Amino acid sequence: QVQLVESGGGVVQPGTSLRLSCAASGFTFSSYAMHWVRQAPGKGLEWVANIGYDGSKKYYADSVEDRFSVSRDNSKSTLYLQMNSLRAEDTAIYYCARVTYSGSYRVIDYWGQGTLVTVSS
Amino acid sequence: DIQLTQSPSFLSASVGDLVTITCRASQGVSSYLAWYQQKPGKAPKLLIYAASTLQGGVPSRFSGSGSGTEFTLTISSLQPEDLATYYCQQLNSYPRITFGQGTRLEIK
């Protein structure tokens, strides 16, 4: 069955860096685009970044552009999010999620359980 | 950016009730709209995509409708396990997807 398992979260100080990982299993990872979505404590869902199936195309939310970088290693079935210059407002649970297709519709169907990033001095 | 506004933000209903949640888009999103259920402490779960297509394994009491700028999620007969926050999501501006602010559903 499809599984997405995030890791790498923790408590860090403002201005520092952190790299999140998302290990995928149960499907052919290299055939699927992926997203990162975050959720601040008690708040709603916010899209963070997207990467195409082969890593050639990447997109970012304005709030993280120039600070975060998404990448993937298809040989390891793993998605990454490199987060630099972290700010207090980046505190959130970070989810990775898979994109599939149903006819002409893109569908974000599977999500990981999330990893918590806390940015605090 | 396309903004999604859900109403109501909070809803309290009884078991067996018909529940309706609305999602309005700031501009047309065709049928590129999905609904998610998020239970406390859990990841979001896909309920409906393409505005009205039920995801496999989701109970048939859930249904979606609408197109363009106005969409509805309906629960035909509320069950205790439906306690959750519900989010709409637009994919018309993919990959720059956006979510509604959420509707918290409480069981009376």
Image: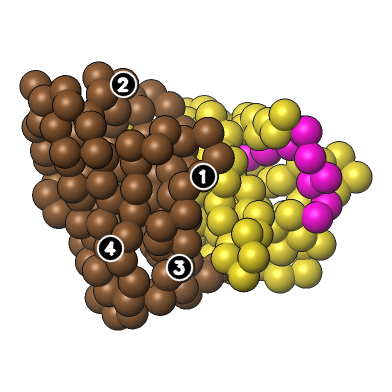
Chain colours: A yellow, B brown
Badge 2 marks a residue whose secondary structure is helix
* Residue at figure coordinates x 11%, y 25% from the top left: B14
- Residue B81's disc is 2
Amino acid type, callout 1: Gln
- Looking at the picture, do discs 3 and 1 lie on one chain? yes
- Looking at the picture, do discs 3 and 2 lie on one chain? yes
Amino acid type, callout 2: Glu
Q: Which residue is labeled 1 in the image?
A: B55
Mark 1 crowd level (few <14, some 14–19, many ≥20, 10 Å Cα): some
Mark 3 crowd level (few <14, some 14–19, many ≥20, 10 Å Cα): many
Amino acid type, callout 3: Tyr
Q: Earlier in the sequence, mark 1 or mark 2?
A: 1
- Looking at the picture, do discs 3 and 4 lie on one chain? yes
The subunit carrying tag 4 is B
- Residue B32's disc is 3
Q: Is B9 or B32 nearer to us in this picture?
A: B32
Residue B61 belongs to magenta span? no
How many angstroms separate mark 3 from mark 1 (CA)? 14 Å
Circles 3, 2 touching at the beta carbon (< 8 Å): no
Q: Is residue B9 above or below residue B78?
A: below
Residue B21 in the image, given as x and y percentages of width and height: 20, 50
How many angstroms separate mark 1 from mark 4 (CA)? 17 Å
Q: Is residue A26 above or below residue B92?
A: above
